[in-house]
Image: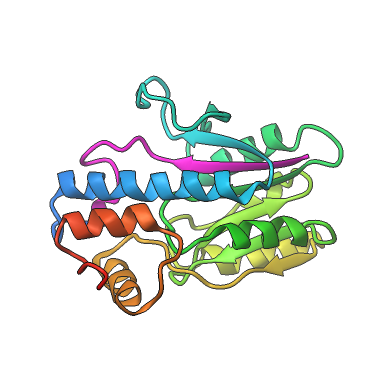
Amino acid sequence: MNRLAIFARVPVSGRVKTRLSPAIPLPIVAQLYRAMLADALEVVASSGTGQVSLYWDSIGEEPSDPALPGVAIRHQRGAELGERLSSAFGELLAEPGDRAIVMGSDCPDLGPAVLVEAFAALEDRDLVLGPARDGGYYLIGLRRPAPALFEGVSWGTDQVLGQTLGRAEGMGLRVARLAVLDDIDTPDDLVRFVARRCVSPPGPGARTEEALRDLGLLPGRG
């Protein structure tokens, strides 16, 4: 079975996307993050690629309203990201034949076709990665648990993708790489997103675009 999980933070001011501040006030950053998370949920729902779970980063603080019908609510477990990813894949790959993808909640350029491509890659590859422009990845997929893949990685740095590929090679994993996309962590990331959306046709990330227009950070489409 195909299983798809979104890793997300509880959208509270001061706890999400803090690197966008002080360029953008923290309450507005939280509003923008809610829009990005809504886009991520819409993408996985419209892709039709499998069972969907939303993994919150904390327990007991998630919003009380349901995310989407049919979305299982779970919690990330572990002290750092590698432990949390390893734990999630252990849950998602519970049965023989399962395929699992974990994606972030801050890549509004990610569309349903990317998820379809990622699951297709797992038909004959062990690992699929969606490289992010900052040296990390916006998506990772496995066909079997691989706890060692997440050990010794410098999380939160531009070395994450390279170190992960190095560990995968050492483990003999067959790897597929998707197109490079931007996630939104810094003001420069946001500027690039706005610039792309000023000249591109409508696509994924509609909620993020709407939030940016409401904030006066993106002009309306003529």
Q: Position of residue 117 (x, y in %)?
A: 69, 62
Who is closer to the viewer here, 201 or 113?
201
Numbered range of the magenta stretch: 1-18
Q: Is residue 85 above or below residue 181?
A: above
Q: Where is residue 161 in the image (x, y as percent from the top left)?
A: 56, 66
Which quadrant of the rendered structure holds the N terminus?
Answer: top right
Q: In this view, does 20 lie above or below 83?
A: below
Q: Is residue 47 toward the left or the right of residue 187 in the image?
A: right
Who is closer to the viewer here, 87 or 61?
61
The quarter holding residue 201 reads: bottom left
User: Residue lying farthest bottom?
Assistant: 199
Residue drawn at point x = 21 percent, y = 41 percent: 14
Who is closer to the viewer here, 204 or 193?
204
Residue drawn at point x = 58 percent, y = 29 percent: 70
Residue 123, can we see it? yes
Q: Is residue 172 toward the left or the right of residue 25 in the image?
A: right
Q: How many labels does the image show?
A: 0
The quarter holding residue 58 reads: top left
Residue drawn at point x = 63 percent, y = 69 percent: 178
Which quadrant of the rendered structure holds the C terminus?
Answer: bottom left
Residue 164, can we see it? no
Residue drawn at point x = 41 percent, y = 62 percent: 183
The reply to whether the magenta stretch includes residue 56 is no
Q: How is the image coloured?
A: rainbow
